[in-house]
Amino acid sequence: MSDYPAHVEIEPRVHLVRGTNDARFPEANTLLIDDEILTLVDAGSNPEQVFSTLRDLGHQPEDLDRIVLTHFHADHKGYAAQLRQISDCEVLCHPLAREGVESFQTMMNFIGIDNSESKGHWTNLLISRLPHVQNDYIVDGTFRDDNPIDCGEVQLIPLHSPGHTHDHTCFGINGLEKILLVDIDLTEFGPWYGNTVSDIGEFKKSIEQIIDLHPKIGISSHLLNPVTEKLEAHLESYLTLFQNRDEQILNHIAEGVNTVKELAKIPIIYPRIPHPAYLVFEEIMIDKHIDLLSKNDLVLLEDGQLQVLRT
Ligand SMILES: [Zn+2]
């Protein structure tokens, strides 16, 4: 399926199952905990990657006991419904994720698909990139932030880290030295917050809280390898991207681009808009920047027209 090994060991019993497509959207990595309770964290990587990892470790797909979801996004809940059908495993998520995982309509509400045009774009994107995520899912239970998930030898420590989405949860693996960072993903693209339920302030705070834990190893859902060198510096520079984007937006407004729609068309956050659905996300992200810039009296938004007040 991929021209790199399907999985790498993070520590005994903990394996990173790499998504195909270099783990980039619509794929994502998953973690397999090969323990008393055979547990998958997320289900967004191609099932062949999961199956070949299971086979390498002496298991069958039917052996899977549990799937723990990090948030409601389609590239993370991914194949959970199909895997549950094969193995009858239980599916757990954060209480705030539950409705978005279970109901396709709620997932769209969380995302911010609120009119027929954006619904059309989003549906087309799903059909072409995520055809397996068009149904409702079954969630068997929820995990709690202060309650480690016991796999046998391995403990997963949920660290609710909202911002990317309201339900986004990182996981400490047997302590807090190794953290599954999920979509604090340390990719070159930078932070993504293109949903109604995303929040820039919360996202920054979550990154700062992870930095304060001084983890040594960070596992991204969208990088093929864990970050093992200078993790803190990587997190710090990821954090600076919010301000870089603020500055770019201010510069464009100063040059006369004076509506959110026009700013989104440039685009500023995406390097390019490869599919119309991405324009919706770009607009939502720019809107969130404008909100904060207005609150800080840096821009004035009047009758839909933007103007820089100070830089
Ligand atoms: Zn996500």
Image (cartoon, rainbow, N blue to C red):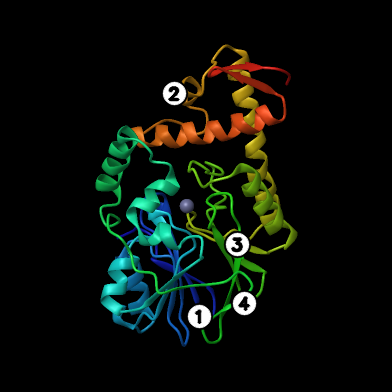
**Residue drawn at (66%, 17%) of the image:** 308
Say if disc 3 is inside 8 Å of ligand 1: no
Mark 4 or mark 3: which comes first in sequence?
A: 3
Q: Quadrant of the N terminus?
A: bottom left
Check whether the beta carbons of the residues at disc 4 and disc 2 lie within 8 A of each other: no
SS at badge 2: helix
Nearest the camera: 106 or 183? 106
Give the Cα distance between marks 2 and 3: 33 Å
Q: Amino acid at mark 2?
A: Lys
| Beta carbon at label 1 within 8 Å of ligand 1 | no
Left or right: where does residue 102 sit relative to residue 234?
A: left
Label placed on residue 174: 4
Q: Which residue is mark 3?
A: 160
Q: Nearer the viewer, mark 1 or mark 3?
A: 3
Position of residue 10 measured from the top left corner of the image (x, y, whole percent): 54, 71
Which residue lies under the disc numbered 1? 13
Q: Determine whether 291 is above or below 188 in the image.
A: above
Which quadrant is home to the C terminus?
top right
Sequence-earlier tag: 1 or 3: 1
Q: Residue at x 25, y 45 (%)?
A: 128
